[in-house]
Amino acid sequence: MNSLNKSIKTILLIGGIALATTLVSCKKKKTEAVTPVVSYESGVLVVNEGPFGSGTGTVSHYNKNSQVVTNDIFQLTNQFPLGNIVQSINFINGKGYIVVNNTNKIIIVEQNDFKYTGTITGFASPRTILQIDNDKAYVTEWGSGGFGKINILNLSTNTISGSIAIQRSGPENMLKKGNLVYVTCKGGYGADSVVTVINSSTDAIVTNITVGANPDDIKEDINGDIWILCAGKYKSDYSSLEIPGSLAKINPTNNAVTTSFSFSSIYSQPAGLELNSAKDKLYFNYDGGINSQSITTTSLDNTILVARNFYSLGIDPTTNIIYAGDAGNYSSEGKVIRYSSNGLKIDSLNVGIIPGSFYFK
Amino acid sequence: MLKKINVVLHFIAIYLLTLTANAQSLVKDSVHTIEEVIVSSNRLNRFSTGSKIEEIDSSIIAQNANNSISDLLANQSQVFIKSYSIAGLSTPSFRGTNASQTAILWNGFNISSPMNGGQDLALLPVNFVNNIKLQFGGAGALWGSGAVGGTIHLINVPEFNKGYSAATSLSLGSFEDQQENFELGISKKKFISTTKFFHHEAKNNFSYINIAEYGKPEQRIKNASFNQTGILQENYFKLTKNQNLSFRIWYQDNNRQLPASMIVAASKATQNDKALRSTLEWQLLKEKNAYFIRVAYFDETLNYKDPLINLISSSQSKAFISETEVKIKLTSNQLLNIGINNTYNTAITESYVNRPTQNRTAFFGSYQLKNKRSTLKTTTSIRKELISNGANPFTASFGIEGWLLQRIRIKGNASKNYRLPTFNDLYWAQGGNPTLLPEQGYNEEVGLAYVVCKEKISLEAGVTKFNSNVSNWIMWVPNNVGIWSPENIAKVWSRGEEYDLKFYYTLKKIKFNLAIHYHYIRTTNEEINTADQSALHKQLMYTPTGKGISNIGIEYRRFRIACTYNYVDYRYTTSNNSQYLEPYQTLGLDISKTLILPHLILKTYFQINNLTNESYQLIAYYPIPRKSIQAGITINFNKPNKK
C-alpha cells in the first residue's frame, strides 16, 4: 500500500505540473469585436485576396483624414467572412459589389457602412464587375476550364439575366468607352492575346483586337487612347517566359493597335497598370520595381521610380499618391507603402493578407 | 542502375554473413539461447536506447479497431493530427514538425510517399496492424530520411500454433457509416497464414454551423462520402529451427469525395488512392547472431478529378526497398548491428517535366553496451546515405538508458537527423528546385520516469524534456519575380516538455486503467532568409503548443466503460501569429461487453464521439462533425490445434 500512496503522490505531482502548464498556455484572451461607429463613405479601400488554401479575403479601409486603417471591415460589420480569394470591388448605385473568386459569389454591401445586403450566385470563377447603365452590369468570369464568358447582371434584381459567350480565355478587366466595352482576355487556365470589344447596348461582340500575350490591365489616358498591359506567357515547363510581357496602345477610333512595346525580361511579368491623375503618365510593377512610363514616348522609358517588388499598385486620382501593396510572406498580413508621385516614401500601412487591389472612394 | 545496386547489395550481404560468421567463431559461446520466434522491428526493440517510445495500449487498439490510424492517434496519442474533415487528408505532427519530418514505417519499411514525403493516415486502417509504437524525436541514424520529429511504427506480430481462427465484425455509425471486417487464419507450429479484409464506407453528410455565411446557418456538408476496401495477406514460415520467412501483401482501394471548405464554392472533386504494398523477409536467428534480409515493393497511385474545372490529374509512385541487417552479440553485454539499405524511388505525373528516379544506399550500424547487471545501457548509431541525385547525409545518435533505485528510469538521447527534399520539392513543373539540400536536425532529450510494476498495480509516470533544431528547413516562397519555389531558408527551434502517466489497478474483479498525456511545445522560426521577417520567432502555423489527452477505463466482468478526453490549444492560421483557431476539447465514450464462450468470443460495443457537441475546426473553415455514434459487434472463432 505504501507504493500506492507513493504512486498517488506522483500522479498528483504530474497532474499539478500539467495543470500549471495548461494555465500558463491559456493566458491568451480573445479580444471582443467592437461594433464600429466609423463610416466608410470616403477613403481608400484595400482589397486583400486572403491566403491561398484555407483562408478568407478581407477589405481594409484607410481614412485619409484620420490616417486610421480599419482591417476586415466586412467581418467587423457583418460577423462572417467574405470567402476565399477576394478578387475585386466596385460601387454601383450606392452599393458595393465584392467579387469573391473561389466562392463563385458577389457579395453586396451598403456603400457607406458596409452592411451586408445580399449575395449573387451562379458564377464560375468571377473576376471583375462593371456598370453598363442603371439596370445592367457586366461580370467577367473564367468559367470551368476552356473559355470564359461575360455575365449580364440585372441590377434591379441582382441576378444573372444572361451571358455573352466570347469564345476567349480568361476575361479579366473591362473598360467602358461610350457604347463599347473593352475586355482583356488574360488567358485564364491557358493563354490568350486579345481584347474583346462588346457593344453594350446589344451585348454583341464587335471585334477582337490582337495584342501581346495574356493582356490584363486596361486604362484610358488623357487623349482617349486605351493602354493594355500584357503579362506575357510562360513556357510549358514554367522555367521562363516564352513570350515576355508587353504594353500596347489601342486607338479607339479604329480599334487598331498603334503602339506595342515588348519588355526584355524573360522572368518578370509586368502588372498593375495605373495612370496618374493627369492621365498622362503610366505606372506599373515590373522587374522588382515601380516603373513609370510617359504616354508620349516612342519606346519603354525603363524608369524605375521605386526599386522594390510589389504585389499590387494603385494611384489616388485626387492626391496622386502611389499605393503599393506588399504581400510579405503571403501567409500573414501585408503592407501598403505610400509614395509621392516622384517615388518618395510617405508611410506604411498594415493591411490584410495579400493586398491585391485598391479602390479610391 | 537498380540492377547493379542490387547485385552489389547481394554481394555485400554475403560478405557481411561471412564476416559475422568469422566474428562468431572468435567469440566464445554464451549460455543464452534466443527465445524470439519471429523478430519484428529488431532496431526498434534493441537499438532505440534513450528514445521516448509510446506503445498504444492493446485495449485502445481494440477500442479503435474500426477506425483509421488518423482517428486513433488524434484521440489517443500526443501526436497532433492535421486533418481536413473526417476522411480527408490527414497527416501527423510530432513535436511541432510536419508530415514529411515524420517517418511512417510498416514492419520496418518506410511507406512515406517519395512525392510528398508523407502518408495519409486516414487511409491506414487500425485493424490491419497488431501493434502501434510512437517513437518521439529524431531517429535518423536508425530509420533514415524523415525520422526528424518522430516515427510511427505499424507492426504485424505473428503468433504460432494458435489453431484455426475466423473473425468478423460489423459496425454502424452516424452519417451512414458502416464497416465490415473478415479475417481467416491458420496458425500451425511452423506456419501461419492470415487473410484480413475490410470495407468501410460512409456518406458523411454531417451537419455543421456555417460560420462563413450570413446568419451562421446550420448546413449539411456535401460531397464528403468515402469508400475504402482493403485486403491484407500475411504468411509466416519457420523454415528450420532458427530460420524464418515472412511474406505480406496489402492492397487497398480508397475512393473519396473532397468536400469544400466553408469559404469556397461547393466542390465535386473526388480522389482515388490505390496502394499495393508487399514485403518479404528472411531471418536466421542464431545464439550469437541474427541475420535479416528483407525486401519491399510499394506501388501507389492517386487520381484526382474536379469536374467543375474539367481537371483530371493522376500520379503514380513506386518504391523498391532492400535491406540486409546483421545483429552480433559481441560479448554478453555488447551488441552490434550493421546493415545496408537500398531504396529506389520513381514517380510518374504530368506535374513533373521528366520522370524522376532516386537511388539511395545507406550503411548503418549500432553498437550497444550494457553494464553487468543490465541496469544501464548505451547505444551509439551511425548512418551514411549515398543518394543518386543529391547530398550524402551522415547521421549519428547516442542514447543512454538506465535505472536508479529500481523504480526510476532515466533516459537520454542526442541525435543528428535529416529529411530529404521530396520529388515535389525537387521537380514540380513550376518552381521545383533541384538544388535543394536535405533538412538537417539536431535533437536532444532527457526523460525521467517513475515505474511501479506489480501484480495488481502498475504505474509509469514520466516527464521528458527535449530540444530540437532543424536547419535548411524547406519552405515554398515566391521568388523575386513571383514564382513559388521551395528554398532551404529557415531554421526552426522546437522545445518543450511531455508528461505521461499510465496507471493500471486491479481490485478483485474490477480493472481500472488511466492514461494521461500532456505536452507543451514551442516551435518557432528562428531564422528566415527572406526580406519579410514577420514570422521570425513566431510559432509555426497549425502547430498547437499544448495538447492533452486522457483515457480512463473501468472493466467489471468483461463489461468495460472507457472515456477519452482531448484538449488542443490555439493553432495559428497566419505565420505572424495574428490569427488563430480557438482551443477545443472533445469527449468520447466507449461501452463494450465481451462474452467468452468455448471457441467463441463475442464483443459488442457502443461509442459516442464528441459527446459535448463541440464545434471546432482543425484547418480553418473545414467543418468537423459534432456528436456522432457508432455501434458494432465482433465475433471471433478459434479452434486450437490438436495437441
Image (spheres, coloured by chain):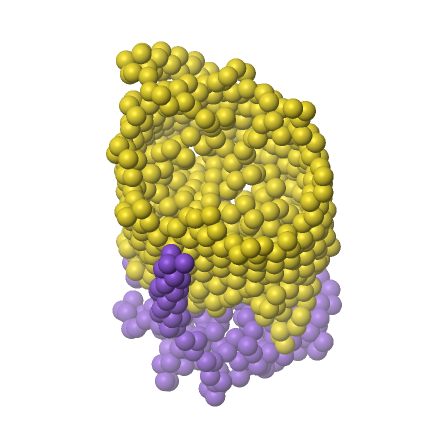
Of the pair A297 and B304, the residue shown nearer to us: B304
Position of residue A334 relative to residue B144, above or below, is below
Report x, y in % for residue B455: 47, 48
Position of residue A95 relative to residue A214, above or below, is below
Of the pair B206 and B95, the residue shown nearer to us: B95
Where's the N terminus of chain A, which quadrant? bottom left
- Identify the residue shown where x is 64% and y is 57%: B591
Numbered disc total: 0
Query: Is residue A101 among what the camera can see?
Result: no
Query: Is residue B170 among what the camera can see?
Result: yes
Report x, y in % for residue A360: 46, 75
Report x, y in % for residue A66: 36, 85
Position of residue B464 relative to residue B208, above or below, is above
Q: Which chain is purple?
A: A
Q: Colour of chain B?
A: yellow
- Identify the residue shown where x is 30% and y is 60%: B537
- Identify the residue shown where x is 29% and y is 16%: B28
Would residue B38 be found to the left or right of residue B11 on screen?
Answer: right
- Identify the residue shown where x is 45% and y is 26%: B35
Of the pair B333 and B445, the residue shown nearer to us: B333
Report x, y in % for residue B280: 53, 23
